Amino acid sequence: MKASAKAHSNIAFIKYWGRKDEKLRLPTNGSLSMNLSNLHTITTVEFSDQYKVDQVIIDGEYHPKETERAIVHIDRIRNLTGKHTRVRVESRNNFPSGTGLSSSSSGFAALTLAMVEAAGLKLTEKELSMLARQGSGSACRSIPSGFVEWKDASTSEESYAYSIFPSKYWDIVDIVAVVSNEKKDVPTSVGQTYAETSPFFQVRSQKMAEKLLLMKQIIADKDFKRFGELIEAEALEMHAVMLTSAPSLIYWSEGTLKLMKLVKKWRSEGLAVYFTINTGQDIHLICQKKDALILKTQLEKIREVKKIITNSPAEGAQSVLDHLF
Ligand code: PMV
């Protein structure tokens, strides 16, 4: 009763910030993302009577808060089996967690698939996505492949993600600039609960369905300029809600701001690059494949950039045969 799974983190181009149902993690609006090839989590789950309690090890360590959250999800899936057998879970990220690279999306997607397989359950992609959503909202988008939409819905059964275009559809590149290894001080799941306190939240919410449709059309057209303009405006709009919520959330650091300004400068010099940012200081720079090398060369010159991670669109969550223990 042991199984392992690999899932990639995803970057949202139309973002999810705020929920209409806290308990079920139903977002206020639909969102759209792309899986990231070089940011992944591998998770192994083993059910065994020899375990007296559930054990969760992340990146070689025991983290009490993360374990507590993971066990709620483990129970959710275990309840589907009708049994009480305890589990050991080991999980490894190939990137820093808590700095804005969405380790919870890859983490909960990999945990969901590994748990389901180790339990011998047979679920569809839609059911896996619904389950992953309840662990961490954006994790539902790491189950399907490539470019993914998480539907706007008002019931749990309808709130899942599905692939709108395969990973090979468009060869855009997401270059992550890691500007610090410091962990964010307000976790995303807590920050989400403040969203509605922003005076801009309602204004934003009213336009999201229209924006999502527009983004889908732009991706269908592969219109990189309009795509870049829309992802950047969308990231800034989400951060405007964060900045004006109570309490306010400032996820950027000096390095983030420096890169935001540099992106605009490089663009004015002819390099087609746009940014997007989640909750954390690390920044995603989006360009076309033909410009990736030149952008990387530019980034290597910036003192604040500690690490560069280059991603292409990736597959969804998959079972793997190599176990972590
Ligand atoms: O799924 P959560 O609770 O980690 O929230 C994700 C929030 C953002 O990354 C900022 C936006 C998004 O849609 O991924």
Image: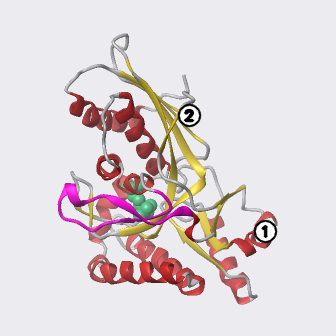
* Residue drawn at x 70%, y 77% as measured from the top left: 262
Q: Does the magenta stretch include residue 158?
A: yes
* Residue drawn at x 42%, y 46% as measured from the top left: 109
Q: Is residue 174 above or below residue 139?
A: below
Q: Is mark 2 on a helix, strand or loop?
A: loop
Residue 118, position as x, y percentages in the image: 38, 28
Q: Is residue 230 visible?
A: no
Q: Nearer the viewer, mark 2 or mark 1?
A: 1
Give the residue at mark 2: 59
Q: In this view, does 87 lie above or below 202?
A: above
Q: Note whether ligand 1 is within 8 Å of mark 1.
A: no
Q: Is residue 293 left or right of residue 139?
A: right
Answer whether labels 2 and 1 touch (C-beta < 8 Å): no
Residue situated furthest top in the rendering: 50
Give the residue at mark 1: 293
Residue span colored magenta: 145-167
* Residue drawn at x 45%, y 29% as measured from the top left: 3
